[in-house]
Image (cartoon, rainbow, N blue to C red):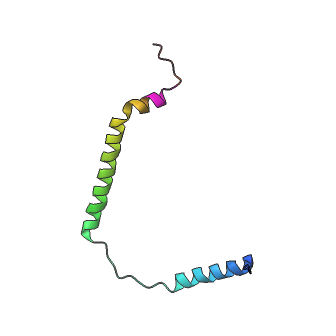
Amino acid sequence: MRFVSATRLRWVLALTAVFLLVAEVPAHAYIDPGSGSYVFQILVGALAGAAVTMKLFWRRIVAFVTRGRSRKG
């Protein structure tokens, strides 16, 4: 089995990168108005999920954070 030299591999990768940058074709695309609403829904859903997770595991989180501290007044 013949291995490719590191120098040759670098040249191939560099020329491939240059070709991909030069040969770029314009997309003529747009972001439709519903996309912003969809992203907003994803963010709200993620925040709601995080809030429910915090509520369910709150005692474990507090116990983890306060571990090692004494409960002396």
- Return the x and y of residue 13 as percentages of the image width and height: 63, 79
Q: Is residue 5 left or right of residue 71?
A: right
Is residue 7 placed above or below 49 in the rendered structure? below
Q: Position of residue 54 (x, y in %)?
A: 36, 38
10 vs 55, left or right, is right
Please tell me whether residue 17 belongs to the stretch shown in magenta: no
Residue 23 left/right relative to 1: left
How many marks do you count on the picture? 0
Q: Is residue 28 above or below residue 71?
A: below
At x 34%, y 79%, the residue is: 29
Question: Residue placed farthest to the top in the image?
Answer: 73
Q: Position of residue 4 (x, y in %)?
A: 72, 80
Quadrant of image for the N terminus: bottom right
Q: Main secondary structure of the magenta part?
A: helix
**Near-viewer residue (6 or 38):** 6
Quadrant including the C terminus: top left
The vertical placement of 21 against 31, above or below, is: below
Residue 63: quadrant of the picture? top left
Q: Which residues are magenta?
A: 63-67
Residue at horizontal 44%, vertical 85%?
A: 25
Residue at the location (53% across, 24% down)?
A: 68
Relative height, residue 20 to residue 64 (above, below)? below
Task: Say whether residue 66 is left or right of residue 38.
Answer: right
On the image, the x and y values in percent for residue 6 come to: 73, 76
Q: Residue at x 32, y 54 (%)?
A: 43
